[in-house]
Image (cartoon, grey):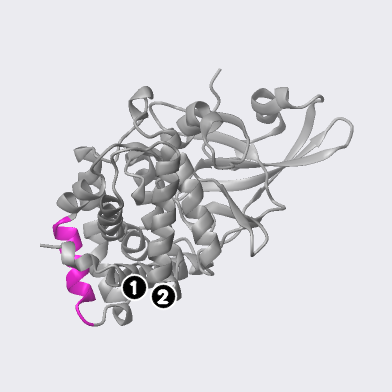
Amino acid sequence: MSIVIERYEEFTSRIANETIGHVYPEKIMDVEIRGLGEGVGLMSSIARGHLTFESGREETVIVKCVARTENSKLSKGLNFYKNEVNFYLHLAQETPIRIPRCLYASVDPVTQDFLLVLEDLGDEKAGDQLQGCTEKERLVAFSRAAELHATFWGRAAEFDWLNYQVDMKTILFRRDRILRPGIEPTIERFPDYFSGDRADIVRKIGDQYIDLFLHAMGGEPTIIHGDYRVDNVFLTGSPDDPDVIAFDWQNTMGGNGTHDIAYFSAGGCDAALRGESEQQALKHYHDILKDRGVEGYSFEECIEQYRYNILVTMITPIAICGTLDQGNERGVKLGTTMLERALTALESMSCSDLLS
């Protein structure tokens, strides 16, 4: 029987035993739910479930369900909840990036209310989008993305539930419900970020979004994370030898792999990581694709699609700053930080040259 909830407080001991009771050797006697902190979960509600078993032993899990804000409507319109449940049910086992273990996943096909219960990796260091990433952390993030994309390169058609980035209904939804409504409010609220011709460039992205998106997502589709950014990974290992654990697979789709790395870099890298180090990271990404058997995809094509994806990923800071319910002060700061980095990224890669 499929079990979903609308609010994480509904994850009681009864629901816990019915959904994840089989994972443990003893009955769950009590569940205490504590919502996770400020700035977590713009598009979903996330909590930590503190489980108490018959023996008195305690353990924690992560519980996800629909967002409590108006953002839930956008999430359902973009199939975020279906995507993440399907990722854990059908793709997680083959995914080469380390991910949290899924204990339970179900979504209502009509309402899209869902329940996801995951391993709690609370001892790991969560990435912080406001802090960004180091050069080595970006390099390993690009490496893991390349391994993911190579694993599923040319295989997207195997998964009949999979949604694709190149879908006109979704593209129009993104443009008309998220990007365009957010452009002028963002410019008006944060004028200090729009010196020179930046405002005109962002307006052109809105006007030309469909053509830009089709260029960005052209070529052989693979499985992409779709929301691959610093806030959606745990940073493990040491500063000299880092690694990542990726979570929040709500935007998992069939698409072009450079979307993931452009999104990670545009939103998570400060100006100091542009230029030669960005080119080296791109070359490293492309080399891994080749080493893992991807053929017929030149480095020049990779760079061009990366540049197009820098342009289309502008939708995220515009959405946070001008369209979505930001939730709290950190949500506002997240939007402006990503906005400045994204504008710097497109200038560094001369992406405006791709605009008509």
Q: Kindly give the residue lying farthest to the top in the view shown.
A: 1
Residue 337 seen: yes
- Left or right, 216 with respect to 228, comes to left
**Residue 136 picture quarter:** bottom right
Q: Mark 2 near mark 1, Cβ–Cβ under 8 Å?
A: yes
The residue to which callout 2 is attached is 271
Residue at image position (39%, 56%) is 283
Residue 251 seen: no
339 above or below 223?
Answer: below
Residue at image position (54%, 34%) is 115
- Left or right, 93 with respect to 276, comes to right
- Left or right, 141 with respect to 254, comes to right
Q: What is the x, y in percent for residue 245? A: 59, 48
State the mark number for residue 279: none
Q: What is the x, y in percent for residue 201? A: 19, 69
Q: Residues within 10 Å of mark 2 (few under 14, many from 20)?
A: few
Q: What is the x, y in percent for residue 139? A: 50, 58
> Bounds of the magenta span?
196-208
Element assignment for label 1: helix
Q: Residues within 10 Å of mark 1 (few under 14, many from 20)?
A: some
Residue at image position (53%, 21%) is 2
Residue 207 part of the magenta segment: yes
287 above or below 92?
Answer: below
Q: Quadrant of the C terminus?
A: bottom left
Query: Type of residue at label 2?
Result: Ala
| In the foreground, 176 or 217 | 217
- Mark pair 2, 1: CA separation: 7 Å
- Provide the major secondary structure of the magenta segment: helix
The residue to which callout 1 is attached is 344
Q: What is the x, y in percent for residue 168? A: 19, 39
